[in-house]
Structure formats: structure tokens, C-alpha cells
Image (cartoon, rainbow, N blue to C red):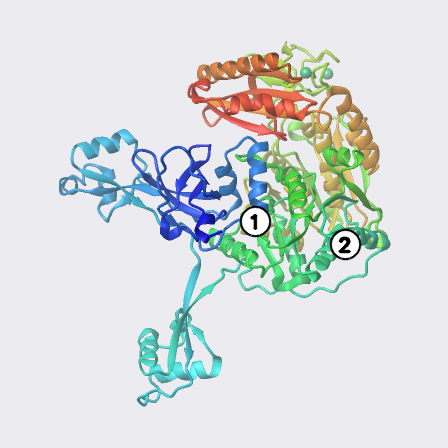
Amino acid sequence: MSSTAQENIYVEVALPRGPRGLLSYKIPQQLRDRVVSGCRVLVPLGRANRRMTAYVVSTSNEKPDYSLKEVLDLLDDEPLFDPIRSELFRFVAAYYHVSLGDVIRCGLPSGLNVADARMASLTDAGRAQCSTEPVLALLQEGDRPVKSLKVSNSQLLRLAKNGLITLRYELERPRVTARYVSVIQPTGVSPSRPLREGASPSLLLKILGDDGPQEVPSLAERVPNHGAAVRRLVALGAAKIERIQVFRDPWRGENAEKDVKPTLNSGQASAVAQVGAAIEDRCFEGFFLKGVTGSGKTEVYLHALELAMAGGLGGIVLVPEIALTPQLAGRFRARFGDKVAVLHSALSDGERLDQWELIRRGERPCVVGARSALFAPLPKLGIVVVDEEHDGSFKQEEAPRYHARDLALKLGQLAGCPVVLGSATPSLESIANVDRGRLEMLELPVRIGGRALPKVTVVDLRDHPPVRPEAILSQPMIDALEETVSRGEQGIIFLNRRGYANCLLCRGCGHVPSCESCSISLTYHRARRRLTCHYCGFVQRVPSACPDCSAQSLELVGTGTEQVERILGEVLPGANVARMDRDTTRGRQLQSLLNRFRSGEINVLVGTQMVAKGHDFPNVTLVGVLLAEQMLKLPDFRASERTFQLLTQVAGRAGRHLKPGRVLIQTYDPEHHSLACAKTHDVDSFVAMELAQRRLRLFPPFSYLILLKLDAPDAHVVQNAAGRVTYRLKEVIGQCGLNVNVVGPQLAPLERIKGRTRYQVLLRSPDRSALHRAASVVTDADSSLLGGARMAIDVDPINLL
Ligand SMILES: [Zn+2]
Ligand SMILES: [Zn+2]
């Protein structure tokens, strides 16, 4: 067979934006031996042939039976993704009902793509009118992309029509590129002419002789007029310039202190042995590593990674929150030094690109990062770890709405390597997978150093009604805080972030109106004065008094951290109270807050979910949970599970060192299984009870959900669209006899966000393939179905608000 017979002439590409389907192009002769799957190409699009970046997903030598445009350029010398990732991207696109291009874009570093952008430039007539039109004034200093002008399309067209500006398309430069720097190094040859003693060139030559090659920009501080000196030495043959790639450093030069590898206890050792065997066999196996907080799960990960690397393989460790990533990455770095890459959203685009490139080259076999690190291009994958697998942040809340824990298992299957999910408080999905034999359980029963778990006390608010300003703190809570502060110890007050949930609570007896068939809190819709269940569609009028105790004290549940911070300031005069939540703390600010708390400058820290995760403060002896109802009564079938997980995590913050810790939980419902089991640290009983409930009500993991979320500025537009979508679904489900339950259309629990009214349609079925078949009918439908509304599809949703 001649080589031309095998030559690939056609490509299928996915676009990062725009059309969902794949497009075919012809490869021009000069690129035929270089265009391969995984590369990016520049292609012409549409009637105007606007240029756009596209991802090559397959090549072939069979001509499609329609005429094709040609690829314009090849953008990568080497593929950006390999066949394993290609397979993973296809799986994500199919399972989450999103375009393949969207998935690939999300899986690659951002800022690399180029496309034609519309540029505006000023005409002479326009220049004369700059003082009257602010948009024209913006263009005075040069041509600009239209999107940076922030004006409407009609305004632009008017300006163009009046001859004040001209519009054209131009290829934008990528937002991020590799960084190169010029390095000067001595050639060892003496200058062809003598240098004047003390002048810049001779000074530079001495530096090169003493300190070796130098980055040219760094000479500015050491050599007067360094640019001229560099040119002079090069001209005289004494030095040469080389351009080399430099990698931006997310650690900013900070060195990691090498740690001492501890000896494993028997539980850890046997877990490492089992995972290690799977690493060596190079085959997929799913493990669930269960261990209470402080039982040493991280050490198991470290040892497993070490085994993988010793075998020439790499590993990915996914961790939940950005707040925690640097901390955990630090531990891996202390063990593995420069072999560790970190990927999280606090990196600059340039830093992320460089980490990604180092990973791809195989120079950073250990990758620690948040959910998107799942797509890290490790050439030889030996293990994937998902720490705190129950954490909600592994689910991406915008398209593609993937769940990194679930995909980690998929990646393990594709790459043929073990996957370890770890948690002290497993998700019910993972426990169900253990029960079904899909995951093997590894247990770490003891806390390192044998330290006791903190004592948990539940304060019944019916016996100790909240006192003091605004009825938030009970007397036992105030007493405990005062004691703690007076002993010079520290406290954490924990509050659920999503305190805004719209459900009603009786301040007298703690009753929360709930749906009888789903046993889930009803959602309060203010405008219509209605309570609804968004799992089954039940609707009820708002009762004027509490159905349980007849008091007229039904109020919305919800207290914010700000309010609590202020009240604590009043209750604890002289104490230093600070607040930590998503609004107040980002990046460095967060670090400084944590440092102030660690140093003891802050006595009491009020916080949301962020305080619950992983931090280790030796002097914290009290953790207070204010209104457990704020978590427990969310209109979400996972409310009990999340409450249990959070309480267990947050309790793990107390007494981690020598001083014993305690936890106080205020609630109206002390018998609730989430609280009762959190109190005794009894994970197994909680899981058993909660699984029984889920089985009874047919909630995941005993059924599967897809949530269709529609929104539009106009309430009628979205209502009609949701109606059409529901009708189409029910039609198909009826025709095909699919076992899928459709609830809706109904207003979302949060009815309006950012000026858009929100509706949702919930699909539920024990039969996963029937569910996806039904959903694909509306996700593949044309835009007339939506009539101007937006629709997002959320497969396996974890946020139903
Ligand atoms: Zn009541
Ligand atoms: Zn219901």
C-alpha cells in the first residue's frame, strides 16, 4: 500500500462555541501529514467565512458526499488531547447532553483559541465628531474590537452607516501564550576588542563569568544601560543570546519544606497495599476509602501516588475547594517536591497554561487540583484520587454540568487505573456503589494519635428559646462562647450558606410545612402566597397559623453571617469576631483572615461551608451550629445528607489537638436522624436510615434525575416555553412507553435571578437509559421549541433550587 492511500484528507471538527454538531473540512495538501486528532485548526465558518478555532476529533480519507471547505491553518504542532481524553470528552458530551466542543474547551486551558473579531476604526468624519460621541472618543487612540466598546449592534451599524466608523474582521491574538525570555550567556571567547575597565559591558561580562547565564530583563537592576551592554558583548563575540521558554510559577518561588514520611498504621498499610496492587496491574478498580476526620486518608493518597510514580506513572488528586487546594497541594509538594503540579481557579491563565504544559510533557506526574484537574493531560495515568468525594463542588454548575467524581471513575475505566474516592462522610451514591459491588470499601477506623472525637451537644430550642437581640442565640450557646473566650480559646460559629431558601418555620414549635408524599419541605412562593413541592408538583395555600401549635409564628427560615457577626459583637464585648464567607474572602484576603485566626488575634470566627473544610486550628475548642433547620429543611432531598456531612465536618474542626473540643448544635428537631447520628459520630447508622428513606421515596441513588432549567426576562415567554417542553416530553414518553416521571413545568424555588424568571421541569426514572432518551428529545430540538427562552439541562443535578 502506498503512503498516499493512507493519507488523511478530511477532518471532523468540534467548535468551542456555536453549532452543536460536528463539521467536516478538507485538509489542504501541505498540512496533510500534520493534522491529527487532538490538534486545533483554524476553519472558515458560515457564509461570511469567519475564521474560528476548531478541535480535530477525527480524520479520514473517505470523502463525504457533499462539498467541503478547506482547513485554513494548523494551530498546534502536537495534539492537545490524546485518545483517552478524546473518549472521555465524547462520553461527557453524550451523558450530559452538551456539545463536544463545549466539553473540549472546558477540558483545555482557557485563552488559547483565536477567532475573527469585529474591529472598529474611526474615519476622518468620525474623528471630527469625537467630542459628541463617547464611543468615537474611545477609538481615537486606535482600532478596537467591537466587543470592548460596550455598545449595541444597532448603534454600531448606525455609526457605520453615517460614515463615522468602519467595521472589519480581524484575527484576534490568543489571550494566553507560552512565555519566552532572552538569556545571555558567555561564549568563553574573549571580546574581539578590549573593554573599558568599569564600563557596563565589562561589568556584564564579569557577572556572566561569576554567576553564569542571566535573563536579560533581570539585568536592569545590576547593569547600567544593560540593553546596550548586552548588544555590545554579543557584537564582540563574547556572549550569545538564546530565547528559552520560562514557566510561570504558581508557588511564586516559595520553597516547600521536605516532610518526614511517617510509618503507616495497619489500616493505612492495608489500604495502600490494595490500591498498590491495582496500580501495578494497570487495571481499573474503584475503591472507597472511608475514614473519620483525622484518620490519615491523605497519607494513603501520598503512598499510593509514590507507588505510581515509582512505576513511571502519574496520578491526579482532586480536592474540593479552592480554599483547600493550596493547603493539600502543599502536603504533596513537601513529599514530592518539583514533581507536583497544581491546577485550580486561583491560578492566572498563564500559570495554568504552563502547569498544563509541564504535565503534558510528563515533568509533573503528580497533579493536585480542583474538579477541572480531572482533564489534566497526564501521559501515563496510574491512579485517580477524589478526596472528600461527597463534596458538592465536584459538580460544575455551568455547562458542561459534569460531576468530577463520577467522571473520575469513567477516566479510570478508560485509562485502566484504580480510582480512590475518599471521605469521612460518604455520599449515598458512593455507598450504593459499594453495596452494588462497583466500589471496594477500604476503612481507616481510628483517628491518628487516638484522639477522641469532640463531644456533641444538641440544644433543643423548644426548651431553650433563642434570647437576646433578634432571637438567634440560645442561652447555652452564649454561655459556651463566653467560657471559651474567657479561657483564651477560640470558637467557630457555623451557619449554612444557603440560608436564603424559601421555606417557612414556626418559631414557636419548629414545625416546617412539608410534602406528605415526598417528605420534603415545601417551597414558599411569596407572590402567589403558595407552598409547593417541586418534586411532585403538590400545591397548598400558606396557612395563617402553625398547623401544629396554632401560634401565628410561621416565618421564613434564614439568617445571614453578617447578622450573626453583628450580634456576636454585642453579646461578647471585648472579643474579636470576624466573618468568613464567599462574599468577604477571596484569595489572599482569605489567607490573611486564616492567619489572623490561627495567630489568635480573632477569638470567634463566623462562617459558612468554608469554615467546615479541612482547616486545622489547634486552639479551637468550640464549634457552634446556630439554626440546624437552615440546612435540614432545605427543599432538597439531599438536605439530611448534607446536614449530616457538614455537621460531621464542622465538628472535626474542634479539639484536633491536645485540648478537648465540643460542638453545640441549636435546633427545634433534636431527634432528626441527621443530628442524632452526627451527635454520636455514627456514619453507618445515618447512611442506613437515609438509604431506607431514599428507597421509599424513590430518590437517587434509587432513581435518576434530569432537571431542565428554563429562564427568560419575560415570565410569559419562559412559562410558555416550559409548557411546550413538557408537552413534547410527555408526548414522547407516552408514545414510546418510557418509564419516566415528568414534574412541571413549575416556577423554580428561586423564582427570579438577575432579572430572569425561572421555570423548571424535573424528570425522574429508575431507568437511566429511558430518562436520557426522553431528555434527548428536547435537548436536540430546534430553537422554536424555546421561543426565546434559555434552557439548561442538568443531569444528576445536585442543586435543585
Ligand atoms: Zn408551631
Ligand atoms: Zn411532593
Q: Position of residue 84 (x, y in %)?
A: 59, 46
Q: Secondary structure at mark 2?
A: helix
**Residue at 45% over, 84% down:** 209
* Comparing labels 2 and 1, the label whose residue is closer to the camera: 2
Is 283 situated left or right of 197 in this image? right
Beta carbon at label 2 within 8 Å of ligand 2: no
Q: Which mark is residue 27?
A: none
Quadrant of the rendered image containing residue 233: bottom left
Q: Check disc 2 and report the residue beneath it.
A: 276
Amino acid beneath label 1: His
Name of the residue lying farthest toward the front? 1
Amino acid beneath label 2: Gly
Q: Position of residue 253 (x, y in %)?
A: 54, 64
Q: 476 or 516, which lies in front?
A: 516
Query: Can you say whether 30 is above or below 559 in the image?
Result: below
Q: Check disc 1 and report the residue beneath it.
A: 344
Q: Position of residue 203 (x, y in %)?
A: 38, 83
Is 179 situated left or right of 443 in this image? left
Quadrant of the rendered image containing residue 573: top right
**Residue at 81% over, 61% down:** 263
Ligand 2 sits in quadrant: top right
| Mark 2 / mark 1, whichever is N-terminal | 2
Is 77 situated left or right of 326 in this image? left
Q: 426 or 776, which lies in front?
A: 776
Q: 730 or 676, which lies in front?
A: 730
Q: Secondary structure at mark 1?
A: loop
